[in-house]
Amino acid sequence: MRTVISSLVGAALLAAFAAVGSGLISGVYEQTKEPIAAAERAAEARQLLEIFPTATHDNQLIDDTFALPADGPLLTLREESSGYRARKDGDVTGVILPATARDGYSGDIRLLVGVDRSGSIAGVRVLSHRETPGLGDKVDLKKSPWILSFDAKNLENPTLEGWAVTKDGGEFDAFTGATVTPRAVVSAVKSALEYAQTHKQNLFELVEEDAS
């Protein structure tokens, strides 16, 4: 009988501790949820400003968004995502497109590709990757300036054949021992440019001229 009572008391104590612990975790989560969200938003806003600095627009990039579907043939996003518009005096001067290179050496490489109104690249940044440290991770600006080689490029400069790594006859440097990673990024950036060209009317909110 005493064994049964002891077991019941022990179970009750465990349940009480579990409830208290759950309450504490829930309380901590509620207290930290907003600060964490604010920090993530601030980090995202800083990254957008690396592509379109403050002097190039007069709107809040992070608040001027548009929806992009998952699994499109060019951006190949894993899930529905947001793109961003840069404006000056109300006119759209550039867009920032999320893109995913699904053929990285170690998995997806998520990118942000900025395209200006002329169809040229304003900047490219890597959002996340799992590429090999010291090799494929050179696509990250924190590791090397390689990603800056896309600046001011468009679909005519370089030529179609030039949109490849040097090992494949293109203009973009390949990393020694890690050609797969830059090859995937070059292809994804080119596809993002093609998306911007194909959807230019909508992305830049251009009004079609009256044919009459």
Image (cartoon, rainbow, N blue to C red):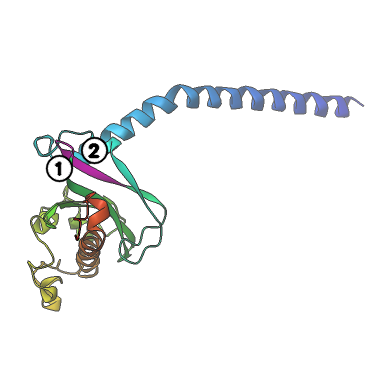
Whether pointer 1 and pointer 2 mark residues with C-beta atoms closer than 8 Å, the reply is yes
**37 or 67, which lies in front?**
67
The reply to whether the magenta stretch includes residue 89 is yes
User: The N terminus is located in which quarter?
Assistant: top right
**Magenta part of the protein: which range?**
83-90
Q: Mark 1 falls on what kind of element?
A: loop
- Percent from the top left, x then y, of residue 88? 14, 38
Please indicate whether residue 173 sits to the left or right of residue 74 in the image: left
Q: Which residue corresponds to the image point at 11% horizontal and 55% vertical from the top-left?
A: 118
Q: Does residue 55 lie above or below 82 as drawn?
A: above
Q: Amino acid at mark 1?
A: Phe
> Label 2 neighbourhood size at 10 Å, few (<14), some (14-19), many (20+)?
many
Q: Which residue is mark 2?
A: 61
Q: Is residue 178 left or right of residue 73?
A: left
User: How far apart, in angstroms, are the residues tagged by discs 1 and 2?
Assistant: 9 Å
Residue at 42% in and 54% down = 79
Q: Residue at x 15, y 77 (%)?
A: 168
Q: Earlier in the sequence, mark 1 or mark 2?
A: 1
Vertical arrangement, residue 73 with respect to residue 138, above or below: below
Kind of residue at disc 2: Leu
Residue 52: assigned label:
1
In this view, the residue farthest toward the right is: 1
Residue 126 visible somewhere in the drawing: no
